[in-house]
Image (cartoon, rainbow, N blue to C red):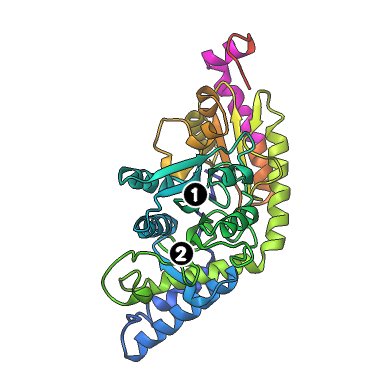
Amino acid sequence: MSHIVYADNAATTPVSDLVLNSMLPYHSNFYGNPSSLYKIGREAKKAVEQSREQVAGCLGALSNEIFFTSGGSEANNWAIRGIGYNLAKQGKKHIIASAFEHHSVLNILDVLKKDGFEITYLNVYKEGIIRPEDLKNAIRPDTALVTIMYANNEIGTIQPIQEIGNICKEYSIIFHTDAVQAVGNIPIDVKSLNIDLLSLSAHKLHGPKGIGALYIKKGTKILNLIEGGAQERGKRAGTENTAGIIGLSIALKDACDHIKERTKKLSLMRDRLIDGALKIEYSSLNGDRKNRLPGNVSMCFNGIEGESLLLKLDAMGICASSGSACTSGSLDPSHVLLAIGLPHEVAHGSLRLTLSDQNTEEDVSYILECLPLIVKELRDISPLWEKIINKKVKSF
């Protein structure tokens, strides 16, 4: 295959040369356990703490507020479980979330429900954005936690985090945000946004897989994640993933240092891709047009199946998805698309294209060259399409 276009960067990103080269010495020369007293151990420990400071600096946090995890899902689980069970001791067993959180949030909330917690899911409306007044109306005296993602992993819409943080501060409620898709794409200052806990992951910003972090505001009481040694100040025991931590810090700093130029480049490519895809009849954009991540394009094409579309795109060398990477094996329509009001038959025809700074205008041109041809080919063999154009089936 001569032409490969990788457009699934919301699922994962390739590790950059800068990050890879920064990690290699900690797989070879400085391989010591950071808890050891000898030199190669001390060198590893020093690198871990320098990385912690660098991650904190990118978020406007203190270094002792950063705790390294295995990724975003672990950080989300820790934040929700750790705060929920801790505040349950005070009789606070009510949690507020949006209706289209990542499954690592939704599934741990289901676990808490079995233990007697009550969960309120806020409407995200057609635009894919919650309304702050809905949050205010949902707060109760026993509300322990608000957990609302910063930017949606499927349709890319950005939530009003400042307003959410302000409301939570006003009502003295702990606020957690899953910022896995937002970090590195949006400037974030946890203090000014009144965020108490924030989850992030390295592999979404050209870092390695298997490493992430949870920001925990100083003074926030949370249950330990893993009991054992004294690593991560006793809250998450286990030998540190030194090379991964280095990779995370380098990837995050590189993303934050170049965020303005990356945002400009990605937004231009995104808008060109959206405009071109919308020229296909019976197509629609999912979520708000402007208030979305710079590299996210989420579309639906009536009359086709998303799985067939992905296979045809793959045959043309285009890597894409129909939604979250965590549910790519499911035949059910995306819970995110259902949450914004799309009917099942339309949600089945979804496509997510997510760009990074490694994509080019030529990539966009190639996608726009292939996409209309593939959609037409699939519609030509679809009995549903004939019913749609004959108005026997309701379209968008």
Q: Which residue is mark 1?
A: 11
Circle 1 residues within 10 Å: few <14, some 14–19, many ≥20: some
- Spatial CA distance of label 1 from label 2 is 19 Å
Circle 2 residues within 10 Å: few <14, some 14–19, many ≥20: many
Q: Quadrant of the C terminus?
A: top right
Stretch of the chain drawn in magenta: 369-388
Q: On the image, which quarter does residue 106 sit in?
A: top left
Residue type of the residue flagged with mark 2: Leu
**What residue is rendered at 31% in x and 77% in y?**
230
Q: On the image, which quarter does residue 128 sit in?
A: top right
Local SS, label 2: strand
The correct choice, above or below, for 186 with respect to 103 in the image is below
390 or 15: nearer the eye? 390
317 or 15: nearer the eye? 15
The correct choice, above or below, for 349 with respect to 184 in the image is above
The correct choice, above or below, for 365 with respect to 59 in the image is above
Q: Which residue is mark 2?
A: 214
* Magenta portion: prevailing SS class: helix
Q: Earlier in the sequence, mark 1 or mark 2?
A: 1
Query: Percent from the top left, x then y, of residue 235?
Result: 35, 70
Residue type of the residue flagged with mark 1: Ala
280 or 117: nearer the eye? 117
Res. 201 in view: yes
Image position of 267 (left or right of 174): right
Closer mark to the observer between disc 1 and disc 2: 2
Res. 99 in view: no
Tell me, yes or no, whether the two marked residues, 1 and 2, touch with CB atoms within 8 Å: no
